[in-house]
């Protein structure tokens, strides 16, 4: 049986904790063959982003077209798209090419607080990319930006915002609740006909660099196994959250960097060795 292929369209992180590097590690850990189209180079570490060099939109388009001319891709995730030109180029290619489920992680701000999406690109994400998505995975601040409102202050408001984003975009929504207070971390999955509250005990760690990238990549890797788009995203998301929980729980032992350290994508291998 040929490999199941997942594609990430995102920026690079030299520290290996986020972006394309985290996505490829996640794909490999979950059994998908990883491919990647780069949208930006960043100068960053566990202590923050110090610079961004954006790839020209036409070259991002060229990367995508050349790859899709040759490789059958079973699932796609997008991460850092940097600006409106890249966002529209990616949406144009993915909208016209046959591919598997599309998971959109609307990356706007890094864990460190550094902005990773030009303000002018928000409309392009909302208007051009989200209508193509099968699942969108914003965190609380990102959902607020996409809706043009204030961030949710609790789970009830997060439910309302996830359902409103579902109504506006037509795509299922996984609103990540890591920014909310409480002993549990509560994500909201809104899909047609059902809204689910997904709870896990909150892990107390500062080593959360790349958490959002990892979760969306895990969803894409798991979705790539299927022969079609999931009838419900809940089983896929629950398995992806299991993987994220394990990688977060093992993160403190890595000792990489002096800021917000990365997750341990090889935790299952280390536990089994």
Image (cartoon, rainbow, N blue to C red):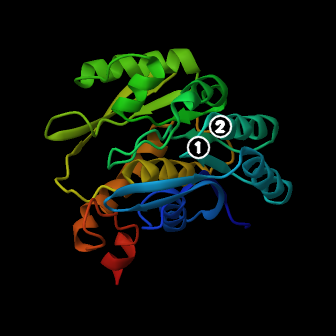
Q: Disc number at residue 81?
A: 1
Q: Is residue 140 left or right of residue 78?
A: left
The residue carrying pointer 1 sits among few (fewer than 14), some (14 to 19) or many (20 or more) residues within 10 Å by Cα, namely many
Q: How many marks?
A: 2
The residue carrying pointer 2 sits among few (fewer than 14), some (14 to 19) or many (20 or more) residues within 10 Å by Cα, namely many
Q: Disc number at residue 144?
A: none
Q: Is residue 153 above or below residue 238?
A: above
Which numbered disc, 1 or 2, marks the residue that appears first in the sequence?
A: 1
At a point 31% along the width and 60% down the height, the residue shown is 47
Q: Is residue 115 above or below residue 49?
A: above
At a point 58% along the width and 21% down the height, the residue shown is 170
**Cα–Cα gap, marks 1 and 2:** 6 Å
Instruction: Give the percent coordinates (x, y) of residue 159.
Output: 34, 21
At a point 45% along the width and 37% down the height, the residue shown is 234
Quadrant for the C terminus, please.
bottom left
Q: Are marks 1 and 2 in contact (CB under 8 Å)?
A: yes
Instruction: Give the percent coordinates (x, y) of residue 201.
Output: 19, 46
Q: Is residue 41 above or below residue 139?
A: below
> In this orientation, which residue lies closer to the viewer: 170 or 197?
170
Question: Would residue 172 be seen by someone viewing this image from the given angle?
Answer: yes
Q: Is residue 11 above or below residue 194?
A: below
**Residue tagged by mark 2?**
87
Which SS class for mark 2?
Answer: helix
Quadrant for the N terminus, please.
bottom right
Instruction: Give the percent coordinates (x, y) of residue 106.
Output: 50, 37
């Amino acid at each position: 049986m040929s490999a199941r292929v997942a594609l990430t369209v995102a920026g690079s992180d030299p520290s290996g904790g986020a972006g394309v590097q985290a996505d490829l590690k996640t794909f490999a850990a979950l059994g998908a063959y990883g491919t990647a189209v780069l949208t930006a180079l960043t100068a960053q570490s566990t202590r923050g982003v110090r610079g961004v060099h954006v790839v020209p939109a036409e070259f991002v388009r060229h990367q995508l077209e050349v790859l899709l001319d040759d490789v059958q891709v079973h699932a796609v995730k997008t991460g850092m798209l940097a600006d409106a030109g890249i966002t529209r180029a990616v949406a144009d290619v993915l909208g016209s090419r046959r591919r598997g489920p599309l998971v959109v992680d609307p990356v706007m701000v890094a864990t460190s607080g550094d902005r990773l999406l030009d303000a002018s690109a928000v409309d392009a994400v909302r208007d051009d990319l989200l209508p193509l998505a099968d699942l969108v995975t914003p965190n609380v601040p990102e959902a607020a930006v996409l809706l043009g409102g204030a961030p949710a202050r609790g789970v009830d408001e997060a439910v309302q915002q996830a359902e409103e984003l579902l109504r506006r975009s037509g795509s299922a929504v996984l609103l990540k609740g890591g920014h909310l207070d409480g002993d549990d971390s509560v994500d909201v999955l809104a899909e047609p006909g059902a809204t689910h509250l997904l709870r896990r005990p909150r892990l107390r760690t500062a080593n959360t660099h790349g958490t959002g990238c990892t979760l969306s990549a895990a969803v894409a890797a798991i979705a790539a196994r299927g022969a079609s788009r999931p009838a419900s995203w809940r089983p896929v998301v629950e398995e992806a959250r299991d993987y994220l929980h394990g990688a977060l729980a093992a993160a403190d032992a890595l000792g990489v960097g002096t800021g917000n350290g990365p997750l341990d994508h090889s935790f299952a291998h280390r536990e089994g060795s």
